[in-house]
Amino acid sequence: MSFSLATWNINSVRLRIGLVEAFLKDHQPDVLCLQETKCPNDQFPEKAFRALGYAHVAIHGQKGYHGVATVSKLPFEDIVRQDFCAVGDARHLSTRIEAGGRKIRIHNLYVPAGGDEPDPSINPKFRHKLDFVEELRRTNADGEPGVSALLCGDLNIAPLETDVWSHKQLLKIVSHTPVETEGLITAQKDGNWTDLMRVHFPPEEVLFTWWSYRAKDWAASNRGRRLDHVWGSSDMAPVLDKVEILSEARGWEKPSDHVPVIARFSL
């Protein structure tokens, strides 16, 4: 059985529902995880997703900020909304599905951006980000016996040198500072996660999923970062067929600054 998972920081699902609909019609992932939906649960456009065959909808939203949602062609067996750092932000949602004879727990995450100053002593947003990543260490790929796991979303950290356009120039820029990259890699290792994007694309290959709105010509300058990730439990790596990064989506009309990432599996 083929199975596909897509992740996309949409930067307002209501503003960009047309882009989402077009993406789903063209690429047909079984599950789509959205981040930064920016709407309360009662204003999430469920009808649009159901009309396209995504009958199963899980939402963790809040007014104007943050928010994650998972829509699926396959039924959910369980829904969990975790309040990371106990601040009331809607940044995590997990569901459990069954596909190809196996159960799969899917974590959908939106890690805090962290502000502009990479000093937790003077920037509470950066402190929050580091605390969030520290708490992420307790999210384990092997946490449920007999259940595989996927973790995806906007993790707001580009951990490898090849995940940014200039390693040297971004070492003091939030999203690529050593304390962040080391923290995320530690969370990945402690949680027994495999970076599935880097299973498909070798670590020496430059890989971006985000390009700033500030760039006059994002494609020409190509100053991107890999902020969006797909991790898996060890048993998901051998059944991974490919990972697609839809960089062309950054050039769509009124786009998000992130592009969709699709992981395809043979189960």
Image (cartoon, helix red, strand yellow):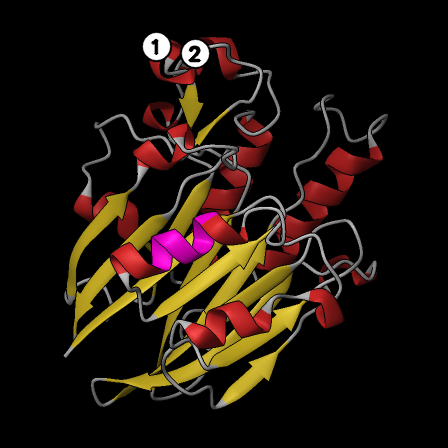
Q: Which residue is mark 1?
A: 220
Question: How many marks overall?
Answer: 2
Mark 2 residue type: Asp
Specify whether residue 200 is in view. Answer: yes
**Residue, x 67% and y 51% (percent of image)?**
132
Horizontal and vertical percent for residue 226?
Answer: 41, 34
Q: Which residues are magenta?
A: 19-24
**Residue, x 42% and y 63% (percent of image)?**
32
35 lies above or below 30: above
Q: Is residue 21 one of those drawn in magenta?
A: yes
- Describe residue 67's horizontal placement relative to residue 18 as left or right: right
Q: Are marks 2 and 1 in contact (CB under 8 Å)?
A: yes
Q: Give the numbered dot on residue 217.
A: 2
Horizontal and vertical percent for residue 196?
Answer: 28, 53
Residue 83 occupies which quadrant of the picture?
bottom right
How crowded pointer 1 is (Cα within 10 Å; few <14, some 14-19, many 20+) is rated as: few
Which residue is at the front of the view, 17 or 186? 17
Q: Secondary structure at mark 2?
A: loop
Specify whether residue 191 is in view. Answer: no
Which residue is at the front of the view, 182 or 79? 79
For the N terminus, which image quadrant? Answer: bottom left
**Residue, x 36% and y 30% (percent of image)?**
208
Horizontal and vertical percent for residue 157?
Answer: 52, 36
- Describe residue 121's horizontal placement relative to residue 70 as left or right: right
- Describe residue 266's horizontal placement relative to residue 92 as left or right: left
Q: CA distance from mark 2 to mark 1?
A: 5 Å
